[in-house]
Image (tube, rainbow, N blue to C red):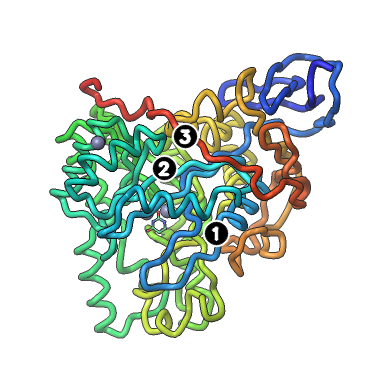
Amino acid sequence: SDYDLVIRGGTVVTASDTMKADVGIRAGRIVAVAESLTNAAKAIDASGLLVMPGGIDSHVHMAQPAFGGPAMADGFESGTRSAIAGGTTTVLPFALQPRGASLRASVMDYHKEADGQSYCDYGFHLIVSDPSASVLGQELPALVADGYTSFKVFMTYDDLVLNDRQLLEVFDCARGCGALVMVHCEGYDAIRFMTERLERAGKTAPYYHAISRPQSVEREATHRAISHAELTDVPIMVVHVSGREPMEQIRWAQQRGLKVYGETCPQYVALTADDLKGLNMDASGGKYVCSPPPRDAASWEAIWEGIRTGVFQTFSSDHCPFFYEGEMGKLNPKARTSFRWVPNGIPGVETRLQILFSKGVVEGRISLNEFVALTSTNHAKMYGLYPKKGSIAPGFDADIVLWDPNRKETIRQELMHHGADYTPYEGLAVTGWPVMTLLRGKVVAEEGKILGALGDGGFLKRALSPYAVPAGGA
Ligand code: DUC
Ligand code: ZN
Ligand code: ZN
Ligand code: ZN
């Protein structure tokens, strides 16, 4: 036969086109997209379904230790299981460098966790917390050359924060080695000041997490990162943008011709600070603690404006799961004393596509093609995985999600495959659901059942991002 597998009768959607077509797969790759393909060893009937590139989630956390706090609820086994169940076939988690540690040794720790223990393909961004001379002079450039072509830096958190001088040094290094820099834009001192003031006033419930880091704190840091990027002529990706104020800073930079990119996430169009509100330490507010915090309904509209007008290139989950109950939980004894000790992050790798499809496509805010761009294609292009991942065309890996655009479902914990003991989207009604997920031509999930094997997922050595080329040239 000509094909190992043909996906027949579906509507193929890419970032640019929507077409009735069959998809022919051989040796794990797409080899044909045509009106009618025959002579296949096996066929899957996709009539009534959308045939889209598998999701690429370029912002997830798995097996990442939370400093002094509880362990993350997902390692690679449960985290990537959750990904494929939700139609995502590639994830880009972070390999975090603890201060004082070698960057290379840190990356190897994450490989130990992931290799042979993943259901989907994965690459790693680095997190640089200690930009010493040897890290910037040797380790980082060597790792970039080895396919870890992007890294994240933080403007807050005691264990991660870089000062302005360090940010500039790191940006300059990225310029030299062609890495794409992701920046967590929230200002350390402002958060510290607000947190201590709130605690002194006895305002320690989860809701005050949002009060401790309002949009102005995110806006200021976003502007500062942009200024440093301009000074060093280095492109940056501002991750997890929560509302109008930081969005407008990015738009302002883009309109001035600076290479500043933006990412946003489901929590910024589906949750609000009110979800954290009025609830004491025993109530559910702790389930929504993430940073930046979810804002309000007006912010949702600002985020949609940014999505529609191209301010944001990627829609990622920022999957960062912690347990809610029990010893390991967000509201463990220490976290009960103040929001300050509640680990920041929520699960979401399995629900990203449904939320964007439902609120975006079904509610008429974005096209099907924009959906594919925001959930897959743009991630591949931004992070050096294109043209291997991110589209349905000859030559691409056969990473595919078959999607029922009419399926009505209510997101709830019992449907989830993650390690966490809750979903922050419990009770959210959505239209559109993944029916089947294929990784390199193999059916790895179907109707919530995991058919793939642990170890099906492989490490992705990534090319340099074309988006990381400085405005002034390489
Ligand atoms: N930043 C992230 O990217 N994820 C979770 C928490 C945070 O601060
Ligand atoms: Zn460098
Ligand atoms: Zn962050
Ligand atoms: Zn994150």
Residue type at mark 3 is Lys
Identify the secondary structure beneath mark 1: loop
Picture quadrant of residue 77: bottom right
Question: Quadrant of the image for the N terminus?
Answer: top right
Q: Residues within 10 Å of mark 3 (few under 14, many from 20)?
A: some
What element does badge 2 sit on?
strand
Picture disc at residue 263: 2
Which circle's residue, 3 or 1, is located before the other in the chain? 1
Residue receiving disc 1: 75
Query: Ligand 2 is in which quadrant of the figure?
Result: top left
Residue 90 is situated, as x and y percent measured from the top left of the image, at 56, 40
189 relative to 364, above or below:
below
Q: CA distance from mark 2 to mark 3?
A: 22 Å
Name the spot of residue 317 as percent of width and height, x first.
51, 50
Residue 461 tag number: 3
Residue at x 66% of width, y 22% of height? 18
Who is closer to the viewer here, 339 or 250?
339
Between 459 and 320, the one nearer to me in the picture: 459
Contact? badges 1 and 2 (CB < 8 Å): no
- As measured in the structure, the alpha-carbon distance from the residue carrying label 1 to the one carrying label 2 is 24 Å
Q: Residue at x 52, y 80 (%)?
A: 327
Residue type of the residue flagged with mark 1: Gly
What's the amino acid at mark 2? Glu
Q: Residues within 10 Å of mark 2 (few under 14, many from 20)?
A: many
Label 3 with label 1: CB-CB less than 8 Å: no
